[in-house]
Amino acid sequence: SGPTDPRISVIGTGYLGTTHAVCMAELGFEVVGVDVDAERVRRLAAGEVPFFEPGLEALLRKHLEAGRLSFTGSPAAAVDQADVHFVCVGTPQRPDSGAADVRHVDAAVSGLVTAGLGPGDLVVGKSTVPAGTASRLAARLAAAAPGAELAWNPEFLREGIAVDDTLHPDRIVLGVAPGGTAEARLRAVYARMTDAGTPVIVTDYATAELVKVAANAFLATKISFVNAMAEVCDATGADVAELAAALGHDPRIGPRFLRAGIGFGGGCLPKDIRAFQARARELGVGPALGFLAEVDAVNMRARDRAVALAHEVLGGQPANRAVGVLGAAFKPNSDDIRDSPALDVAVALRRAGCHVSVYDPAAAANAQDRHPDLHVAGSVMGAVTGAELLLVLTEWPEFRELDPALIRPHVTRPVVLDGRGALDARRWQEAGWAYHALGRPA
Ligand code: UGA
């Protein structure tokens, strides 16, 4: 690194911001992370990542110790110490309309403007926003902080593999205004990736904003497509796992994101498809995204179908039946329970009167906080022992690798419902288990 290297600030140290700040330090830059949450700043500065993400805490500590990375509550420090400012704040779903709430984005930009943003400063939006947000913010900067530039650079990282996704992205999308310095400066930031062959797409603001939500809408559609096929499989006696494997051999379709089960959850896919529909309605093109309402409906139905299948397996008598649930997080390698299909199914069974015992290697504490009345076990055996039905609802590696013969003696009845298509059905059947899954014959 040389004296002309960009100095970086990251506004917002949630999931995205913390990962981005740490990875920018890993690229060799000086980075300051800014957050309004003083407790979060304190924990990060002490080397503690406040959520579960493999590999992130070690890198955080490495760069804190190297003096390359710091955290503060003050946007003034960002403007003083840095010239490229990444906005990584959340855009939660508004309860009324499902639209994205961009108030934190506006507040982050206001904070920078008030701190004296001006010529030489580049503001880079990474948050997922409704199309049109960037051009609105650019107009605001032109009026309130003349000389400062804006770019939009959406992020495609996945939870659980966030560090690797950030350091080795599939593509870099830069939404820029014509004639500015933003493209050159961001190419300098991402030089290590582009040197390694990562493609860069340079485009306008609206296209950059749309790439992000369109990608998530496509992924959600792919998952709901296979879950819709699972419904048809259940009606015909066909096997959705074999169907998906056969479909995936067509390279135009591809095998990924075709795993049938209890559907998608988390902080992104469900929220983004709703916000995208709300924005399309505002823009007068609601019908263009009408199918996303169906994608959402298929997805929510997958949870209901899992609950219905559990009832059926319990002979229609869920009350007081012992049910073991493996998984609470919305996906493996995460402690995130936002809109988690696994937790939704567990809570529905609890409400139906089952004695539910849940185990998750990382999300147990979050699940217990959210649902104090849910019994959360400390181990697989704790959740499984005495169960008349076992549900696998998050495909953690330690669940996929379970030895069905080993746990069989601990359950009251060897019946498993594989909510994620994660288990080797034949192996469980050979060990004496009744195997059930959505879209697969019993
Ligand atoms: C998603 C996108 O994959 C990222 O590219 C994007 O950057 C991110 O949202 C975001 O907008 O920030 P993430 O929410 O971490 O990432 O999780 P995914 O790996 O996409 O999984 C989402 C859900 O789909 C999980 O509940 C998962 O279990 C489910 N899923 C995934 C299926 O049900 N079937 C599949 O075949 C694949």
Image: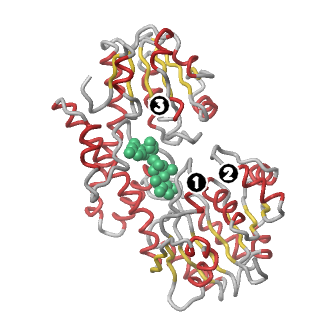
- How crowded pointer 1 is (Cα within 10 Å; few <14, some 14-19, many 20+) is rated as many
Q: Circle 3 — which element? A: helix
Q: Is mark 1 within 8 Å of ligand 1?
A: yes
The picture places residue 330, in percent across and down from the top left corner, at: 49, 40
Per the image, label 1 sits on a secondary structure element best described as helix
Q: Residue furthest left?
A: 236
Q: Where in the figure is residue 257, as x and y percent of width and height?
A: 37, 49
Nearer to me, 182 or 41: 182
Q: Pointer 3: residues within 10 angstroms few (<14), some, or many (20+)?
A: some
The residue tagged 2 is 56
CB under 8 Å between discs 1 and 2: yes
User: Residue 214 is drawn in which quadrant?
Assistant: bottom left
Q: Is residue 233 above or below residue 59?
A: above
208 vs 18: above or below: below
Is 248 situated above or below 181?
A: above
Question: Residue beneath label 1, please?
Answer: 162
Q: Nearer the viewer, residue 182 or 4?
A: 4
Q: Give the camera-side residue of 357 and 395.
A: 395
- Residue depicted at x 47% and y 77%: 205
Disc 2: residue Cβ within 8 A of ligand 1's nearest atom: no
Image mark for residue 400: 3
Q: What distance separates the C-alpha of mark 3 from that of mark 1?
A: 22 Å
User: Is the Cβ of the residue at disc 3 closer than 8 Å to that at disc 2?
Assistant: no
Q: Amino acid at mark 2?
A: Leu
Task: Please state, as top left, top right, bottom left or bottom right, where the C terminus lies in the image.
Answer: top left
Q: Indicate left or right for 230 with 207 as reference.
A: left
Judged from the image, the secondary structure of the residue bearing numbered disc 2 is helix
